[in-house]
Image (tube, grey):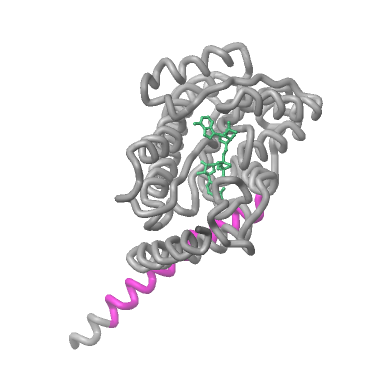
Amino acid sequence: MSILWYFELVGVIIAGLMFFDWFCEFYYNLRAYCARKNLKQYGQGSWAIITGATDGIGLGFAKVLAKNNFNIVLVSRNPEKLASVEGEIKSYGVQTLSISKDFSKCPENPEDFFNDIDEKTRDLDVSILVNNIGSAYAGHFHDSTPQEISNQNALNLWPIVYLTKIFARRMLNRTPPSAIINLSSTGSLVPVSGLTVYCAGKSFDHLFTLDTNEEIRYLAKQEKLNGIHLLSLQPSFVETPLIKDFDRKPLVISPECCAENALRVLGKVNYSSAHWKHMIYAMGYRNIPWYINARVSLKALLKQKKRNS
Ligand SMILES: NC(=O)c1ccc[n+]([C@@H]2O[C@H](COP(=O)([O-])OP(=O)(O)OC[C@H]3O[C@@H](n4cnc5c(N)ncnc54)[C@H](OP(=O)(O)O)[C@@H]3O)[C@@H](O)[C@H]2O)c1
């Protein structure tokens, strides 16, 4: 056999693997696209706890879950904003509980910080946890201040890890299934330079969710307990204060629309951008070589910053 034959064989194998990878991703997205919302399975009259619930996507989740008859625990920083949002959520005819916490302080003593949330919700039947809180600073990494770095890591990393640990154990003892939604981002898929600390953190959140999902599935099977549906939510652009510096109008969706779509795919898939526009964007994005994306994203971000200043 000639050397050309071996080259052809290698080419066919590589093309086959690439097609298989692409096909699996396409099939997974199709499953998410076709999914229908089934929130009743988590139990009537149960509670949903949402971090960063007074604005943006967190507020979107609070409204949509309240409309679906879930009682809501709102966890956020500002007591006045919490009181006003609590009034709004109560108008849907559900019960609420507000917990005021500044998550930038959680690395000082994470155990006390998160155990306090556990204690305050101990008597509630929590069926859904939305680990929504997060923070991003755009710009050159070497220009960012230590406070910007530690604030991002405090909000993007610690709450997901600690709250998943606390609530997973509680949820495994419930009779109906429960759910945990961890906010990752499309930016977790490939490097986005200029959002370096944020996107690396969001990749952590995404992988943490998938790894934990497997461990919880194993544990539930071993102990013959009900499962927990974990979802790494990877939206692209949602109209919130976080993306005020970005100009991606055709891709922007509302926080309620983001929450509706996340709750629609919950229990059907373990990661998703959930909205069809974001799924298409993420599929394309994932196939761009990382070095091209890193370069192009930094240029685009700096151009945008210049335009905004
Ligand atoms: N927006 C997007 O396009 C997008 C895309 C992908 C992923 N995500 C992810 O989605 C999540 C939510 O994003 P978002 O755009 O909705 O964010 P956002 O609008 O900036 O979120 C604001 C919420 O977080 C609370 N918060 C901020 N800092 C806090 C602190 N130190 N302690 C306690 N609460 C604090 C705010 O409370 P106060 O009102 O008291 O400030 C408010 O309730 C994040 O994890 C983000 O990474 C967003």
Percent position of residue 237, x then y: 57, 54
> Total of numbered circles in the picture?
0
Q: Residue at x 76, y 30 (%)?
A: 88
Percent position of residue 208, x then y: 40, 39
Q: Does residue 185 lie above or below 115 as drawn?
A: below
Q: Does residue 15 lie above or below 54 as drawn?
A: below
Q: Quadrant of residue 111?
A: top left
Q: Residue at x 47, y 62 (%)?
A: 306
On the question of residue 241 being in view, the answer is: yes
Q: Nearer the viewer, residue 296 or 138?
A: 138
Q: Does residue 268 lie above or below 292 as drawn?
A: above
Q: What quarter of the picture does the N terminus occupy?
A: bottom left
What are the residue bounds of the magenta stretch?
8-35
Q: Residue at x 54, y 59 (%)?
A: 27
- Residue 17: within the magenta? yes
Q: Nearer the viewer, residue 82 or 28?
A: 82
Q: Residue at x 55, y 27 (%)?
A: 77
Ligand 1 is found in the corner quadrant, namely top right
- Decide if residue 45 is on the left or right side of residue 186: right
Percent position of residue 222, x then y: 43, 26
Look at the magenta stretch and give its main secondary structure: helix
Q: Does residue 55 lie above or below 105 as drawn?
A: below
Percent position of residue 103, x then y: 47, 28
Q: Quadrant of residue 146?
A: top left
- Residue 50: within the magenta? no
On the question of residue 175 being in view, the answer is: no
